[in-house]
């Protein structure tokens, strides 16, 4: 089966299922595993925002969406040449990836009969379910069940390690200018790691909030997990929030790697957050994934 992934998390799921050799097309944002963009055809492009500030990126996104524009470009010709059997896409967030409706329109225009699977999880349990969905659609259902079972085993081990311990109040900052709080599965990660998520939107879209809304619950720990950034970028954004949280621990986390992408590495994210909240109960996280800023 020839697979095309139109979002980075789906690419990670495909590789976790051992289907990397079947993957023929990816997006310009797919970076895990590291070689994927150089070995596959890139069928979705978008603006390079690496030299933009968080405020500039937010303004660009709002302006484009208000005008009815798209943040991503589907290279329909390249997609057609790949002749995929299955395309993995999403409708969860227009800011995060190309919506599935655009894919359906392109396939109809091209006369392509590929199957389209939209992955739209809202909770950590939903994310685990998508592993099976992709595996079933790709014809390897048992691999999906094994991947879920391994994730559940690790989550259970973390839960047992932090059981009965005080649960620190945790605020998650997914964006700093303007501030956004954590939504969808992110509060589940905090709970699974032995914390209490505050000023959060469990199961719902991440939304813009005021700094007062984030500070009012008096969090013990602040996790800065910016969407679209790995650890170095998270550290820079974490430094910007310090004046708002003078009495809290402030940590930067590899947001794309461990928190915001709904893929297999969310389990790594739970373990890393548990290492922050309960360092004497669980193994330390890898230094390239988290860093204390205050």
Image (spheres, rainbow, N blue to C red):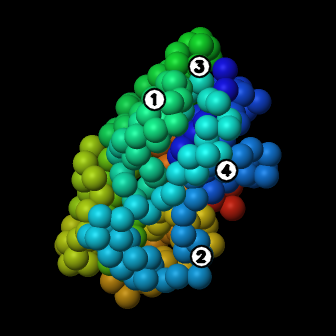
Going from the N terminus, do you reach mark 3 or mark 2 first? 2
Mark 3 to mark 1 CA distance (whole Å): 10 Å
Up the image or down, 176 lies above or below 65; here it is below
Of badges 2 and 4, the one in the foreground is 4
Of badges 4 and 3, the one in the foreground is 4
Residue beneath label 4, please? Answer: 42
Mark 1 to mark 2 CA distance (whole Å): 30 Å
Of badges 1 and 2, the one in the foreground is 1
Measuring 45% from the left and 50% from the top, which residue is drawn there? 98
Coordinates of residue 225 in the picture (x, y in percent): 47, 63
Mark 4 to mark 3 CA distance (whole Å): 20 Å
Helix, strand or loop at label 4? It is strand
Residue beneath label 2, please? Answer: 50
Coordinates of residue 278 in the picture (x, y in percent): 49, 52
Say few, some or many: other residues with alpha carbon within 10 Å of mark 2 (under 14 / 14 to 19 / 20 or more): few
Helix, strand or loop at label 1? It is strand
Say few, some or many: other residues with alpha carbon within 10 Å of mark 1 (under 14 / 14 to 19 / 20 or more): some
Mark 3 in CB contact with mark 2 (< 8 angstroms): no
Going from the N terminus, do you reach mark 2 or mark 4 first? 4
Measuring 26% from the left and 70% from the top, which residue is drawn there? 66
Coordinates of residue 69 in the picture (x, y in percent): 36, 65
Measuring 61% from the left and 14% from the top, which residue is drawn there? 140
Residue beneath label 3, please? Answer: 138
Going from the N terminus, do you reach mark 1 or mark 2 first? 2
Mark 1 in CB contact with mark 2 (< 8 angstroms): no
Measuring 49% from the left and 83% from the top, which residue is drawn there? 53
């Amino acid at each position: 089966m020839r697979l095309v992934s139109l979002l980075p998390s789906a690419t990670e799921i495909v590789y976790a299922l051992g289907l990397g050799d079947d993957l023929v097309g990816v997006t310009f944002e797919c970076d895990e595993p590291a070689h994927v963009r150089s070995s596959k055809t890139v069928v979705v492009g978008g603006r390079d925002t690496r030299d933009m500030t968080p405020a500039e990126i937010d303004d660009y996104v709002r302006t484009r969406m208000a005008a009815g524009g798209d943040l991503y470009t589907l290279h329909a010709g390249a997609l057609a040449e790949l002749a995929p059997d299955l395309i993995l896409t999403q409708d969860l967030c227009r800011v995060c990836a190309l919506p599935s409706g655009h894919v359906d329109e392109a396939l109809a225009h091209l006369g392509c009969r590929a199957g389209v699977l939209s992955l739209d999880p809202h909770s950590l349990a939903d994310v685990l379910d998508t592993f099976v969905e992709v595996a079933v659609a790709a014809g390897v259902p048992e691999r999906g069940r094994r991947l879920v079972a391994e994730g559940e085993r690790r989550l259970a081990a973390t839960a047992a390690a932090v059981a009965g311990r005080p649960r620190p109040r945790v605020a998650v900052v997914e964006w700093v200018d303007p501030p956004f709080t954590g939504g969808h599965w992110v509060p589940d990660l905090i709970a699974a790691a032995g914390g209490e998520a505050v000023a959060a939107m469990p199961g719902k879209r991440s939304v813009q909030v005021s700094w007062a809304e984030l500070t009012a619950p008096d969090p013990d720990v602040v996790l800065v997990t910016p969407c679209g950034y790995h650890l170095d970028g998270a550290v820079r954004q974490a430094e910007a929030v310090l004046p708002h949280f003078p009495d809290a621990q402030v940590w930067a986390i590899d947001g794309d790697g461990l928190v915001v992408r709904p893929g297999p590495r969310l389990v790594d994210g739970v373990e890393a957050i548990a290492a922050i909240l309960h360092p004497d109960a669980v193994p330390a996280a890898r230094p390239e994934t988290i860093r204390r800023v205050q």
